[in-house]
Image: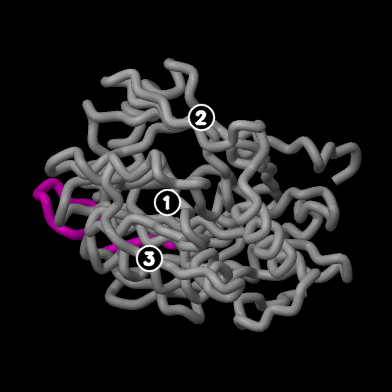
């Protein structure tokens, strides 16, 4: 796109040329359809509108120095979408259909893929909706799967610089044995109260604690939390945390550089013992945390006293980006070049 300031893109929606859609009717998925429309026709009694039968994924495509577009771990996104579908009784999307839709949408919108060296990427949003009409609370018998893309910059305007996080105790993102470990819209609706409270207080995102006893770290808004100490990468384990594909990748890279990795409950009291802390996810990739402030007690924990990201977080971040953009050998088989 001419005159696009790729290096200063926000993380937001920019209209692209095409999206791809597919419908599940009479027990089977149909053919992919290409559309240039930004809107969808939907029944007034569709289950996605009334009962939250909706799931989505977040992915990115990266333009390499060679001009080729790379998908990052698309199989993991396909599997996670189907776990979400099964969790709220929607029709799962076959992995090959998922891939075909993603690849077709990316290539149809190739001109929106940010050039190599700009730090931006093409964000991919697969979306699954219950479109069948129901007035009683029950699963739909019809579904729509669609994929659209938009070029994006960093999720937090600070980019790869330390951010300030607020501990929120008067609202919950997800309940134990609920839907917190699958990627459905209801989790994000539930997080809005905490997000607005944190941002109104001057922080970029909330830190949610476990809903049961408010003792253990859950998530950072829409991202996973991690802490580093004693050459160990530590990330919370909980039945209500969404398994982050980025966090999964970071754990692999941490092991690869000789670190220990622990996935376990992380008590609030342990936060001050970390040498580094951060949030990670597809949108944010890795965001260093410089400060965590408890809005209830007024206690503040500082990590990046010099205002710079921690050395280990920066090393892993740069290595992950190098693999995604094709600058480093992908020995983990995470990347697929699509065109």
Residue 4 screen position, x and y as percent: 84, 39
Q: Secondary structure at mark 3?
A: strand
Residue 231 visible, this angle: yes
Residue 43 visible, this angle: no
Label 1 sits on residue: 224
Q: Quick check: 184 left or right of 127?
A: left
* Residue 142 belongs to magenta span: yes
Pick whichever, 23 or 98, lies toward us.
98
Q: Quick check: 327 left or right of 302?
A: right
Q: Residues within 10 Å of mark 3 (few under 14, many from 20)?
A: some
Residues at marks 1 and 2, CA–CA distance in whole angstroms: 15 Å
Residues at marks 1 and 3, CA–CA distance in whole angstroms: 14 Å
Residue 144 screen position, x and y as percent: 40, 60
- Residue interval drawn in magenta: 132-145
Q: How is the image coloured?
A: one colour
Label 2 sits on residue: 164
Q: Earlier in the sequence, mark 1 or mark 3?
A: 1
Residue 141 screen position, x and y as percent: 23, 64
Label 3 sits on residue: 262
Residue at x 44% of width, y 46% of height? 274
Q: Residues within 10 Å of mark 1 (few under 14, many from 20)?
A: many
Residue at x 27% of width, y 20% of height? 296
Q: Earlier in the sequence, mark 3 or mark 2?
A: 2
């Amino acid at each position: 796109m001419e005159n696009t300031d790729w290096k200063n893109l926000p993380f937001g929606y920019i209209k692209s040329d095409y999206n791809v859609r597919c419908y599940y009717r009479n027990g089977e998925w149909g053919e992919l359809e290409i559309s240039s429309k930004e809107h969808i026709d939907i029944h007034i009694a569709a289950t996605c509108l009334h009962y939250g039968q909706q799931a989505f994924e977040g992915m990115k495509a990266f333009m390499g120095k060679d001009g080729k577009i790379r998908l990052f771990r698309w199989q993991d996104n396909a599997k996670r979408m189907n776990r979400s579908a099964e969790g709220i009784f929607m029709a799962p999307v076959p992995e090959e259909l998922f891939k075909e839709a993603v690849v077709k949408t990316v290539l149809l919108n190739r001109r929106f893929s940010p050039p190599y060296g700009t730090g931006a990427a093409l964000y991919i949003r697969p979306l699954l909706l219950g479109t069948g009409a129901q007035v009683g609370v029950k699963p739909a018998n019809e579904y729509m799967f669609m994929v659209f893309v938009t070029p994006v910059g960093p999720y937090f305007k600070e980019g790869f610089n330390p951010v300030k996080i607020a501990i929120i105790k008067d609202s919950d993102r997800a309940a134990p044995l609920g839907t917190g470990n699958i990627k459905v819209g209801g989790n994000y609706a539930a997080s809005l109260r905490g997000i607005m409270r944190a941002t109104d207080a001057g922080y970029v995102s909330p830190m949610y604690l476990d809903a049961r006893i408010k003792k253990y770290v859950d998530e950072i808004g829409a991202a996973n939390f991690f802490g580093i100490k004693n050459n160990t990468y530590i990330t919370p384990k909980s039945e209500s945390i969404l398994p982050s594909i980025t966090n999964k990748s970071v754990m692999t890279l941490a092991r690869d550089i000789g670190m220990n990795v622990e996935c376990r409950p992380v008590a609030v009291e342990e936060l001050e013992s970390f040498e580094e802390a951060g949030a990670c996810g597809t949108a944010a990739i890795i965001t260093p945390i410089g400060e965590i402030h408890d809005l209830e007690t007024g206690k503040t924990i500082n990590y990046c006293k010099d205002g710079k990201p921690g050395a280990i977080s920066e090393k892993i971040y740069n290595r992950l980006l190098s693999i995604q953009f094709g600058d480093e050998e992908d020995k983990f088989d995470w990347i697929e070049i699509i065109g």
